[in-house]
Amino acid sequence: MSEPTPNDLNATLQTAVTHCNAGRYSESASIADQLLQHQANNPDALHISGFSRLKMGMAQDALPLLQAAVKAKKSNPTFANSLAQALLALGQIDAAAAAVESLARKNKLTAAGLNTLGDCRLRQGDPAKARACFEKALKLQPNLDPARVNLGEALKEAGDLAGAIAHYKSLVQTHPHIQSAWRNLGLALQDAELFKESIPPLEHYATLNPSDVPSRLSLGSGRLKTGDSVSALGDFELAIDLAPNNAEAWNTRGLALRTLDRHDEAETAFRRALEIDPKMTVARVNLAHMVNEIRGTDAALTELDEAIAQSPDDPKCHMDRSVPLLLDGRIAEGWDGQRWRFRLPPDFSGRRDHPLPPWDGSDLADKSILVWGEQGIGDELLHASMIPDLLKMAKHVVIETEQRLVPLFARSFPQATVVARTSPTDPTLGDLEINWQTAAGDLCEFLRPDLSAFPKQSSYLASNPDHRSIFVDRYSAKDSSALRVGIAWHTARAKDGWQKSIPLELWSPILATAGTMFVSLQYGEHSDEIARSESATGCPIMKDPEVDSLENLDAFASQVAAMDLVISNSNTAAHMAGALGVPVWTMVPRAVYGGAPWYWFKDGSASPWYDSMTLYRQTRWHDWGDTIAHVAADLSALSASR
């Protein structure tokens, strides 16, 4: 057989290009390979062969072909972009960026190449540079859909979640054909804990992409978190049909079954997830939480011990093991696991590195101790309940706390030295003679080892009495006979806020109570939610413009102290009211499911931390109806008795 002529080879190349452009990658790769048998260094054939394999999911096979193509044509921006995409597919992010950076510096990169470089910058943790790449790509090619979508991801990674959501909402309106924009909109809404709003875009995407398992799981997760366990279960079972060995699908199926109280099936699902992935800690913990509820603490500990055996250095496993013990009130017994909290990633709020020995429970007579606050404001308020104990035990107590709590703590604990928790450390501490240090939470092990160790104390924080009087007068001027009821309903914590929060739209039975005046104690901006509630119920909720509870906690304490009653979900307002001795009714989610902190314990309506607090416990998963009805009935009776 005669050798093909240059014209023959060129025609073969064009045939390969045609197949490749039409998405027939198997055919284009085969034809390009035939051409390479005659021209082993043909850069265009190398590129088509490599690019086709990349599109077929064969990035490892594509890589040497694309590297050879780029070596032959170093200035070809299309070749460089294909190589970068192959490297990205293989997780070689820095190498992918390097493949296109030089052309970018010379302004020779195509819009597609700029989009790839932006993707690299996103994965390198530089959303600002990523955004610049995507915007430049769109200037070169305004209809480049991947860059439009990725621009939203750059906004999200830069911390502008609201901007990302607005971007995606606009994108699905103006370019509804971009399927990934619908998916990313739903995921961004879930990141913002707007689970109900996330469902329609994820449903739309799932309809168009029924075999996309991760998106199906996200849709099911959104449904589960809005209380639609039946539909969520359907999503998880569809995912299992598509991917029978997907451990996450089995784990989430177990969660849905558990919320339907189908415990045997849920246990089977969790155990199937663990068969697939024995080190899937979250499935083991979910199983243990369910077992704790139906078979007790010892059974739960057996499961959690297995989690530690699988991942002995995982702080989360040790902390999870402590939870059943803490929920039972066996605090000292469970505290070893809690001490692992400071081995969590650096974003864990609180660890301090003072050059002092940690307190081990030793006698504090003639000794001084530094107590440093940790975690959130609510945690600091709760832990402060143990400061009066220390003041009786130690020669001197130094409290290092969040800046906004300094005035309140200084007034409440005048015998102590109170300083702001800053970085670098307040130099005042260097001038003091201090023998011991402790994280505030670690006081629990020694001062609250079990439920019998909690003292009776009506309050332990003191608001500014003059400021409290101003609030009382202000609210009484509106209606001197009404019961002043402060309300809070939302928790912004990304981990479990969705479980602890109680949407204001559900509060209408409470808000309809006669003889009451409702004052918002909710931190953050919720004007629209309040306006919707007022419009739907006709019940006004006062938002005091003089108080910004995120900025001025001392003023907030005075406002809370001016209430006759506080009704709240598990958030800062509840802790503040309890610490001040204001009557407070706290609605907490069903226990042992991540949203009910251990310090509310397993059962009962009394809180040992706060004498003035009554706990109203959720009885059904994701359903606040019974709890709210209970609170509304008690509020009606209280109002009528005045």
Image (cartoon, grey):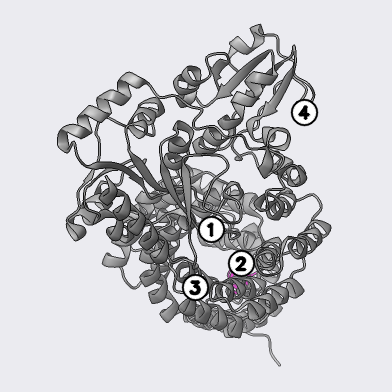
From the image, tell me which residue sits under label 4.
361
Q: Residues within 10 Å of mark 2 (few under 14, many from 20)?
A: many
Magenta part of the chain: 42-48
Q: Assess whether residue 410 is covered by the magenta stretch.
A: no
Of the two numbered discs 1 and 2 on the same chain, state the one appearing first in sequence. Answer: 2
**Cα distance, mark 4 to mark 1?**
69 Å
- Give me the C-alpha separation between circle 2 and circle 3: 47 Å
Considering every residue shown, the one lying at the far top of the view is 431
- The kind of secondary structure element at disc 2 is helix
- Amino acid on which disc 1 is placed: Asn
Q: Earlier in the sequence, mark 4 or mark 3?
A: 3
> Is 112 situated above or below 135?
below
Predominant secondary structure, magenta span: helix
Residue bearing mark 2: 43
Q: Secondary structure at mark 1?
A: loop
Q: Residue furthest bottom?
A: 1
Which amino acid type corresponds to the residue marked 2 in the rendered image? Pro
